Every structure is written in C-alpha cells, then in structure tokens.
Amino acid sequence: MTGFSQGLLDALLRDTHLILPQLFLMTVATLMLWPGDLMFSRAEKHKWAPITLLVLAITAVLVTRTTEGEGFSRMFRMDGLTRGFQMLCVLGCAGAVALSVRLLDSLKQQTVEYYALILFSLSGMLFLCGASDLISIYFSVELMAICIYILVAYLRDRATSVEAGMKYFLLGAFSSGILVYGISLLYGAAGGTTTNLADLNQALALTPKSSSLLVFSGVLMVLVGMGFKVAAVPFHMWSPDAYEGAPTPITTLMATAPKAAGLAAILRVFGTGFHGVSSDWVLPLSYIAGASMILGNIAAVNQQSMKRLLAYSSIAHVGYMLLGVLSGDPQAGAQAVWLYMAIYIVMNTGAFAVVIYLQGQGEGERIEDFKGLGRKRPVLAFAMMVFLLSLAGIPPLVGFFGKFYLFKLAIEQGYVTLTVLALLTSAVSAYYYLGVVSQMYFREPEGEAIPMGAASVFIVTLACILVLVGTAFGPWLLDWAGKVFLA
Amino acid sequence: MFTANTTLMLVATFLPVLGALVLLLVPKDQRRVFEIGSLLIMIASLLLSLPFWFGYDRASDAVQWAGAWNWIPALGVKFSVGMDGISLLLWLLTTFIGPIAIACSFSAILERHKEYYIWMLVLQTAMLGVFITQDMFLFYLFWEVMLVPMYFLIAIWGGPQKLYAAIKLFLYTLAGSVLMLVALLAIYFLQHQTTGVYDFSLASFQAMAPVIAQQSKSYQTLMALAFFVGFAIKVPMFPFHTWLPDAHVQAPTAGSVILAAILLKMGTYGFVRFLLPIMPTATKELLPWFIGLSLIGIIYGALVAMIQKDMKKLVAYSSVSHLGLCMLGLFALNPYGIKGGLFQMINHGISTSGLFLAVGIVYERRHTRMIADFGGLSKSMPIFATIFMIMTMSSIGLPLLNGFIGEGVILMGSFQAFPWAAVVATLGIILGAAYMLWMFQRVMFGPITEVNEKMEDLNLREILYFAPLVVAAFWIGLYPGPIMAVMDAPVRKLVEQVTPGFHAAQDLAVKQAIAAKLGMQGMAAPAAHHDAAPAGHEAAPAAPHAEPAHGAPAHGGGHQ
C-alpha cells in the first residue's frame, strides 16, 4: 500500500467513532437483505419488525454514546445539535416501524426490504443531521430521499402509491438538481476553495461586492433545495400527494424523521454557513415561513382525506419551526426547533397511529370515517382528540408548550409580525382539527369497532400520556433540551 | 410553599376536576350517579369557598392567601395563586352558580350524561382557576382550557345549529386570545430588558406600567389594542359580539347560564385586572373609542333585543347591552364607575342566569321559545310567573333589587367622568325596561291557549335552584354594603394604579370645598383654592413613574 492511501485509511479509521450509529445501521441493513432474508419464510416476514425495533434501540444507544468531534475532512460533525436531531430521527423511525406491522400483515406485503430501506434511509438522516459540508449534505439528502421514494411506491400494485412515488421522485430529483447548482455557485463565489460550511462562512464574508448576486442566487438555490425536502411553501406541492399515496406508516415516517433531519441541516446551513454572511436569506426565508403557515393551514381546512389534512398541517408546522431558524441566536433557535420537533413527533405519530387503526384493510382514511368514534372507541377517540388539540396548540397540552417556547423566541428576536401570523393561522388550524373532533363526537357511528394491534395501543397510550402531562414537566423539558445541546 | 388557607382555596378550585376523574370510572348508564355526584361535588366546592368570604381582610388591598410554587424557573413561570376582593367576588359567583347549573340539567340533558357532567366539572375548575391565578402564563392556560369544555357542551347538547355556534365561539375567542398572548410576550421581554429578569407574575406585569408608558405611542396603542380585542371578544363588546347570540341560543340551558354568568365576566375581569393597571396611559389614550363602543353596545344590544321573537335570543342581546353598561362603568376609571361595573357583573350573573333558567323551563315544557307561542302563563304557572317577574325586575334595575344598585353606581361614576355618556346609557336602561317588560307581558299575560293551560308549574327541584338566585337578588338589592366593602380596597388601589394621586386630589378637593364653605367670609381663601385645585390635577399625570414603583414591592411581597 502506498503512503497516501495508508494515510487516508488511517484518517478514515481515526474518525469512524463519529459515525458508529450509521455504520451499524448500514451493516445490519445489508445483512438483513442477505443472508438475513433467508432466515424467515414468506409467512414469517413480520418477525422483521421487532428485530428492526431492536436495531433502532441499539442505534439510539449508540447515538447517545458517540463521542463529539469533527472528521472526514470536516465533512461530518458530531455535536449537541447532531445528537439531538439524530435522536429525533430514530424516534420517528421507531414509531413508523411499530405502526407498520399490522398494516403490512393485512395487506400481505411483509418483506425484509421494507425494513432494510427504512434503516438505510435512517442512516442517511443521521448523516444529514451532522453534515457540516455542502457536499456531505447533498450526499446524505440523497441517501435519505432515494430510500423514501421507494418506500412511498412500496405498494406496487396500487396506482396511488406508485403515482405518489413517481411524483415525489421527479420533484425530489429536480430539487436536488437545484440544490447542487446552488452549491456550485457558492463554491464558485468562495473562489473555488471550499464547500465546508464554516470555511464558506469566512470565505463568503471576504467576497467582493460584485459577486453578491452570485452569493445570493447560490444561497437562494440551497434554500429552495432544502425547502423541497422539508416541504415548505412554495415547494410543498409534492407533499399532499405523496402523503396520501404512500402506505400510512411511511407517511408517518415522512412527516417526522426526514423533517427533523432536514431542519437540522437547515439550522446548520443557515446557522453556521450563512450566519452573518449576508442577511439576504432572512427575507426569503421569512416569506417561506409565512407562506407555509398561511397556505398549510388554509389548504387543510377543506380536505376530505385525513392524510392530506395532516400533510397540510405538517407544512404549517414546518412554517412555525422555520421561525426558530430565523432566530438571530442559532443556539437558542436550534433548541426551540428541537423541542418543537420532539413534541411534534410524539403527537403526530399518535395521530397517525389512530388513522392506521381506522384504515383497517387499507381503506378508510377519509375524515368521515372518524364518524362516531367517540361512541365506538371512547378511549381511542379521547386520545385522538388530545393529539388534535395539542397540534392546534391548545393549553395545557404539550403542543402549546412547544409553540409557546418557539413563539417566545421569535418575539424576542423581533419577528412580531410573523409570530402574530403564526398565532392567527394556528387559530385557523383549530377549525380543521376540531372538524375531526366533531366527526368523532357529534356524529352517530356506523359499523362495528375493530380490535387494535398491541403496538398501536402502546404508541397511542404512550403518546397520549406524554401529550397530556407534558406541560407540567415544562422545566424538565427545557432542561432536557438544554442538556442535549450542551452535551 | 402553600399555607393551609391557600391549600383550601386550591382544593375548592380543583375539587370539580378531581370529582370528574372519579366519575370517569363510573359506568355510563348510571345516570343518577352522575347527576347527584356532580351536584354534590359542586356544593362541596361552594361550601369550601364560603369561608373565604368571611375570612377576607376588607381593609387590605393586597393579594390575600397568596402562595406560589416555582413551576418553570427558566421562563419565570410560577404556579402562583391568591385573591383580592375583585377576584374573590367572581370566584364566589362561580362556585355559587355551579350547583345551580348542574341542578337545572337533570331534566334538560337526555343523552350522554357521563360526558356532560364531566365536562361541566372540568369547565368549573378552569373558570375558578382564572380568578385565582396571579401569574400571566397560568392565567393564559386556564383562559384557553375553558374553551374546550364549553365547545363540547354546546356542540353535543346544543340546539339545531350547535356545531356552527360551537366552532364560532371557539375560533372567535381563540383568535382574540392569541393576540393577547403576543402582547403578553412583548411585555415580558420589555420587562426583561428593563429589569433583567424573566417573570410572568401579575405583580411584575403591573409594575411595568410606567415603563410601558414611556414606550412609543404606536407600541402602546398596539399592545393595548391586542389586550382590548382579546377581552372585548369575551365580554363581548360591539362589534365583537356576533358569536354570543349564536352560542347562547344553541347552548343547553346550563351552558347559557354559565356563559352569561361567568364566561362573559372573564372579559370584564380581564379589563380590570390586566388592561387598566398594566396599560393605563394607552387606555386613557384610546378611551373615547372604548367608551364609544360601550355605548353602541348598550343601545344596539337593547334595540336588537327589542325585535327578537325568540326569548333566549332576547336575553342574549340584553347581555350585550348590560355588559356594555359594565364596560362603561369600568372605563369611567373612577371609584364609582369601577365599583358599579364590578357590582353589575355580579348582578348580571344572577339576573341573567335566572332569565336563562326561566327560558329553559318553558322550553323543556313546550319545546319552543318563541314569544308568540306563549301568553297567559301566569294563570297556569303562578310560581314560575312570580320568579320570572323578580328576575325581570332585577334585570331592569327596579329599586330593592340588585340591578338598581349596580346601574345607579355606574351612572354616578360615568356621569362624573363623561356626563353625555351617562345620558346615552340611561336611554339604554330605559330601552332595557321596555323590551323586558314587553316580553314579560306577552308571555305571562293575555289570553291563554289550550296547550299553555296544561303547562305544569315549577316542581320542587326547580324552585330549589331558583331560590338562591331570588334570595341573592333581594339580599344584594337591600343590603349591598358587604359586597361594596369587599371591593373597596382593591378598587382604590386600581384607581391609584390608573391615575396616580387620584384619591389625594379628590381628598384635597373635598377639603377645599369644606374650607371654602367655612371660609366664605375671607375672600383670599377661595382664590387660593382655585389655584390649588388645578395644581393637584396637574401633578397627577406627572407622578405615575414614582407611584407604582412604591406599590410594587408591597404587591410582590404579598405574593411569596
């Protein structure tokens, strides 16, 4: 071996401890595909779900144990922000996997690939949370997204699922193109020296005035590319269709984990990379945030499908979280976004668990199907009501606490107009969330109650308790958020 | 952390929700258990609250039975409770109305008993919580929580348009309160900038008044308007009142009673507790608008009530008119006006509850509320007619009954401040007498139809839940002193917060008047008084920065 490649190998090995969770995930996922696939017969494929959950648990432990530092030519950085958002990604994936079992069983679509793809996608997310270079951001985004394209189109004998996958893929590929183009412009503007965010920050500060348009278009394109990934208005068009067509556990996944990873990347790009370079991005980003809140909440009002409703509502929630990105204090902003995301994952997963229960045989995701749930399954309906009211931000549920903390920060940073907009649109959101509640409680039920899977019961119960009593533990929540970021 | 008395106050407040948790375990076909159980819980809460009436120190204007627990130290949020005379009165009104609202539901609620009584109990705790909290975060929490049970009470057990009415109530109030939240946070940060600490306590917010008064005019106006809209929707003041007729008409009787007696008072309480002491300067700046809207509310509500064909809608619009009168009193910003406004809040709670209960009674028997369907009921239902008459008289302010005192004091206060407004308000009171008496006449007298002849008079249960209201109406009307005494000190403090030096100036004026009479023979003395009187008034606006700062430590001290 030559000295150069020996040095490279040394460097790689020296930094592996930073990406242990990802390496573990990739190894396990590869082994699952082969020879793991041979372990269970066709009828026993559902056994992969608990195994995947175990893998996720181990990953969570690894995430908490990974040492801090920066490596791989400063392409990846393990710090508090990375760890915090990585935990959220694992949490989101675990919820989706647990919810998958029953649905895939009933559709007779259990395969090992499904679970392996989730794990591959998760490793992409974990990379994305810590990516500190525009190139590694791009790679991680692709790893994460390509697996999700396939998962969206997973029910291949169903036209809606395939259509959703195709749409998502085309728009995703398009947005990746814009992202790469933006990266290349920034690389050029910085004198062709670096794509590392921290270096870029310094290099861009020194660029002459004449190239400010170049920098601005680069930043804007990166913004557009990232906006696509988290489905912020006006780059949200794919999301309601993809949400509706995808198998519902994958919809749950899309609404939680990739959003957390995407927001982590946005926080890092705008917090580290473009922080203080040019405030040109603040205005476009605040327009994006405002538009997401308005359109997300207003478009949700008229939806007939629960999945589309939750899709639009998740657009609105991303709009709220972008308020945290706008914060002039990146650390405080990241903390507020993280707390909001954690709460959002809990209540959203809970709500999706109820939707999945109602779907039964893969049908019945219309809002009308919630009719009379309060009579048929009082406990379940109560839980759903708690999730919906929490999503609407009604105190004392924990969703209120997340909003309160985020909006408090936004007002502190002087974004009063946007905060007023956020609060008024969240009042609008109460309208459509209550629409579902009124279906559950004020309409007569039809048909018989269906029994519920153990995993779903567990998730709904746990999430409901967390949402109900969360606010009382406000100080501990804040402490926890602080510790995650300082660790 | 909490003294025994504070703990007792918390028990009385949270007893309903604890009871609701117990009732949750009862199987849902046990109708009697829910009815009697929730009634007993409400009565227990009432009994627990009574000692506070006697134990209240009427000489002190501090927050009494104060207790606090550091809930979220990082944000400066405390679980901080306590009451002054103003909160005490409304808190007692709430525990007083609670059992009545439950008792009137026994025959009105025919389905889903379990959910109904549980929501009623949850609502009760949320409302009681609003009146005892001394922390803005906690206040906002209770304020919003209240909406959810009310939404369900209307949307499940309401009339034909219940869903529309419920969502309208919810969204209207939510939209108002989120604006208030923004203003709250803005003041919170302003306070951090000036004092360096994060604190959500009510006392620290009130201590911010001089700092807010120094901010730019547009800042003050926006803050005051955000608070104003939040509270005005709840009151409701014209033009934010449109949710009220819908909600009242669709709500079940108990829902209307609670809505009228307590929920609307949250808005007026908000003005007294927050807008006036925190932003006195901006309030005075915007006062012509506020007074104007109150007057429009008085006249408009009365005129619209006059043409109503539905009894319940008539009473609902009469609430708009009466609450306009309360607001007029509060905005007079002098002791008479504020006392009258507060007093009228209690009165309105009693008389309008009685009227809604009465409408509920005829509705249960005939399943219609149209005035045209009735006539001559005094023949078939003499007891009912008597009670209905007492409540009507109480509502229009007949002497010897409670309404008279409230209206009289409000008019005194507003006449001192704005004579022309008092004149317009009097017109509203006259209109009020007209539409109430006209309704009473059309329903109670005249020829009786065959169906109405068969209507049964009140049964014992119904007499029992009307009795406390009748007693209260007479008691307050004949002997208003004790209630006035309870709010004496807090109102004095409030007026001092709004207009520092008010009482000193007034005392001076009185002394001068006496001195002028005594010293008529010396010509020099009156001349000196004429100089002194305006000087006292001039000094008043200049003092604000010093005065509340003195008040603040004492206020905060009562808190810990």
Image (cartoon, helix red, strand yellow):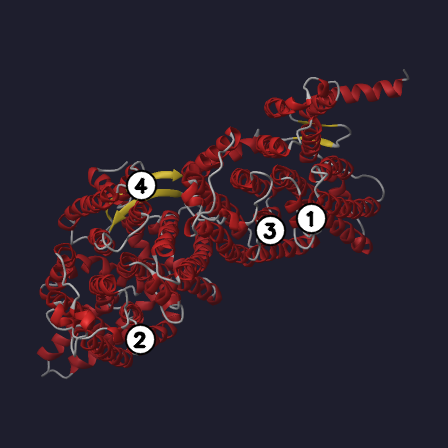
What separation in Å lies between label 2 and label 4 (alpha carbons)? 39 Å
Query: Tag 3: residue type?
Result: Tyr
* Dot 4 alpha-carbon crowd within 10 angstroms: few under 14, some 14 to 19, many 20 or more: some
Say which chain tag 3 marks: A
Q: Are marks 2 and 1 in contact (CB under 8 Å)?
A: no
Res A227 label = 1
* Dot 3 alpha-carbon crowd within 10 angstroms: few under 14, some 14 to 19, many 20 or more: many
Res B308 label = 2
Query: Furthest residue to the right?
Result: A2
Percent from the top left, x then y, of residue A76? 72, 31
For marks 3 and 1 on the same chain, the one whose residue lies earlier in the sequence: 1
What separation in Å lies between label 1 and label 4 (alpha carbons)? 50 Å
Q: Quadrant of the C terminus of chain A?
A: top right
* Dot 2 alpha-carbon crowd within 10 angstroms: few under 14, some 14 to 19, many 20 or more: some
Toward the viewer: B322 or B393?
Answer: B393
Percent from the top left, x then y, of residue A213? 79, 56
Query: Tag 4: residue type?
Result: Lys
Q: Are marks 3 and 4 in contact (CB under 8 Å)?
A: no
Q: Which residue is mark 4?
A: B28
SS assignment at label 4: loop
SS assignment at label 1: helix
Q: Quadrant of the N terminus of chain A?
A: top right
Q: In the image, which is nearer the foreground, mark 3 or mark 1?
A: 3
Q: Which residue is mark 3?
A: A312
Say which chain tag 1 marks: A
Q: From the viewer's perspective, is B459 left or right of B235?
A: left
Q: Are marks 3 and 2 in contact (CB under 8 Å)?
A: no
Q: In the image, which is nearer the foreground, mark 2 or mark 4?
A: 4
Q: In the image, which is nearer the foreground, mark 3 or mark 4?
A: 4
